[in-house]
Amino acid sequence: MDWIKQNYDKAALLAGALLALVCAGLVISMVLAFPETFAGRDSPKPRDNTVVPPETEKIVAAMAVLAKPTEWGIHPGSLFVSRPYVLKEGALVDPLEEGAALHPPIPNSWLIKYELDYADSGVKNHDPDNDGFTNLDEFLAGTDPTTKDSTPPYHTKLRLEKFIAVPFRLVFTGTPDEGQTFTINAKDLRSRTQFRQLGDMIEGSPYKIISFEKKSEVRDEIERNISELLIENTTTGQKLVLVANKEANDPTSFAEFLYLLDSSRFKVKKDDTFSLPSEPDKKYKLVDISEQEAVIEGVDGGDQFKIPKFKD
């Protein structure tokens, strides 16, 4: 012990050398036992050194994705804020929900599609492309409200402002010579009784006498003359039957139209043709008229359209 205390450094070196020698012996013994440890684990199957080719299709597809720049997709709203809501009649309405239309009959999706301000209470009456047709007009016609190249039919801007019936009362009073000559009074012309024959024109009117049929009836034991005189409008081809001593009205009437695109007014006689300022080459015919509406017909296609009464 005295030697160890006196030679401490040599003793420590000797102990370290012994420890290293022991460790080396253990490593050598483990290496020598390595083949025995894995004995029996070697596979009898011969090794296959064939290199499997990679799946080039997937690699090409992945490279194509990497080469294409990333683009933002369509998103109904914002990535950073909540979906927009509109306060309507005290309730919050989600414009992206089709069940709650903000401006019926226009659905919210239609306003969003054309980037129209659905939060504006007057959006239905706006005209973003300045073609004279409102957003409501464009929606009803199925046209694009953001371009002048897409417009509703121009006749949709036509309104009936006034129905004008021109009085022209005719009375067939009889035939003094049993069907050769006919006496006719045109009350509104303030002219004397006219004497006309078959094929003659009634003075002051577009009517010509076509045929005569003698008729009578007994009423209250009195024989009454109900003979019929058939006349025809040479302008329109419309026929009218005049019964003896019974007043008949000429069906001639006029429509006074208001064209909303330029606020112009014009008058059209029933059965006459006309054109609109916006499409002078297209012809329409006025086929019917009443106090409530007029009916026009396209001369080319034959389609009929109802023109409503103008309302202030």
Image (tube, helix red, strand yellow):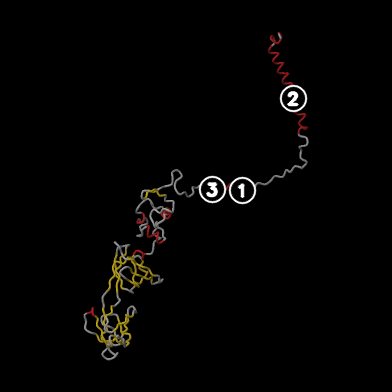
SS at badge 1: helix
The residue singled out by tag 1 in the image is 58
Which one is in front, 154 or 84?
Answer: 84
Q: Position of residue 195 (x, y in %)?
A: 25, 87
Q: Residue at x 69, y 46 (%)?
A: 52
Circle 2 packing at 10 Å, graded few (<14), some (14-19), many (20+), is few
Q: Quadrant of the N terminus?
A: top right
Q: CA distance from mark 1 to mark 3?
A: 16 Å
Q: Position of residue 193 (x, y in %)?
A: 23, 84
Q: Which mark is residue 68?
A: 3
Which one is in front, 277 or 305?
Answer: 305
The residue singled out by tag 2 in the image is 26
SS at badge 3: loop
Q: Position of residue 183 (x, y in %)?
A: 25, 86
Q: CA distance from mark 1 to mark 2?
A: 52 Å
Of circles 1 and 3, which is in front?
Answer: 1
Which amino acid does the dot numbered 2 rest on?
Answer: Leu
Q: Which residue occupies the extreme front position in the image?
A: 220
